[in-house]
Amino acid sequence: METTEKNNLKRGLALFSGGLDSILAIKLMERAGFEIIPLFIYTPFISRKFPLEIKREFISLYGKEFAERVIIHETGEDYLNLVKKPRFGYGKNLNPCIDCKIFFLKTAARYMVDLGGAFVVTGEVIGQRGMSQRKDAIFKIEKESGLTGKVVRPLSLSYFPETILEKNGLIDRRMFPSIRGRDRKTQLDLARRLGIKNFPQPAGGCLLTDPGFSSRLKVLLMEDLFETKWIHTIKFGRLIVDNGIYVVARNNDENMKLLFLKEQYNIPVYVPDFKGPVVAVIRGEMEYAKLLSCKYTKHCAS
């Protein structure tokens, strides 16, 4: 084998979610002697946080040195089109999990090639998620992404066929854990052994799996307003569909979020001259936004 080929096989890209499973997968591969480049794919549905907030969270959890290595890729219109019309359908709500995983792996594959890597690492655990982490779904996703044999899943390695790394004698699956199912005890034990102390607790995950958020999103879909700026806007406050479509902040933090969106995306926002909530106008009139702001405060004179 050529030296350059060996070097490529020692470098990979990791799909990094910010959660424990993906950090464990990266640490296990690094411990085995590989250079791993973390890739965080930011979609409008990944969190109620913005990229800068997520970067700060990575620094607080994993340290500046690691956080600076993370590539943050922000999705665009191609991803929104996928969510609107997923080839493999939705889960219980508006979550196109299989299409989404294919998109993520294809994105990772492009970075992998550009950065001279040879494989993609994921923190997937077989059987952990019902729609996208069944064995048949995982094989379908890998094939559709064009990465057959090049996806390394260190947490469940023994349940899958040999990857490019095993075929070239670079890893031995017996040195990796064999985790499956939803019980996270093994991951927590492994984190302690690897000295990983800071990591976020499992939360709601993708907003597309949330029934409440999905019902809000359907309003945008029905009104042909499925755009990044409006998707961010409906993450906060009270969604009012009356004489238009408005979002009314419920506290000062949401006031700040809507004002940030005003600056970031130039969305129309009513800012009261009394102590009251900021109102984003997705569709409608500013005068009605003022009435809504008055309705939800005791400090409006008229």
Image: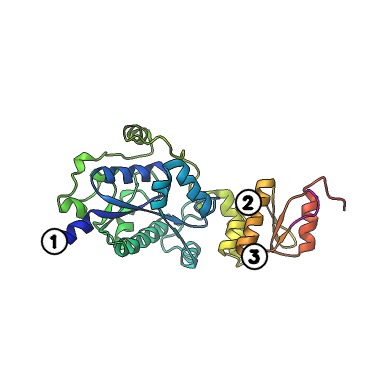
Q: Residue 72 is drawn in which quadrant?
A: bottom left
Which residue is painted at 31% across and 49% down in the image?
Answer: 135
Q: Quadrant of the N terminus?
A: bottom left
Q: Give the number of the mark in front: 2 or 3.
A: 3
The tag earlier along the polypeptide, 2 or 3, is 2
Q: Secondary structure at mark 1?
A: loop
Q: At label 3, which amino acid type do we have?
A: Asn
Residue that mark 3 sits on: 266
The tag earlier along the polypeptide, 1 or 2, is 1
Q: Which residues are magenta?
A: 271-275
- Residue 93 vs residue 289: left or right? left
How is the protein colored in the picture?
rainbow
Image height of 279 relative to 76, above or below: above
Residue that mark 1 sits on: 2
Which residue is painted at 22% across and 58% down in the image?
Answer: 8
- Residue 7 vs residue 220: left or right? left
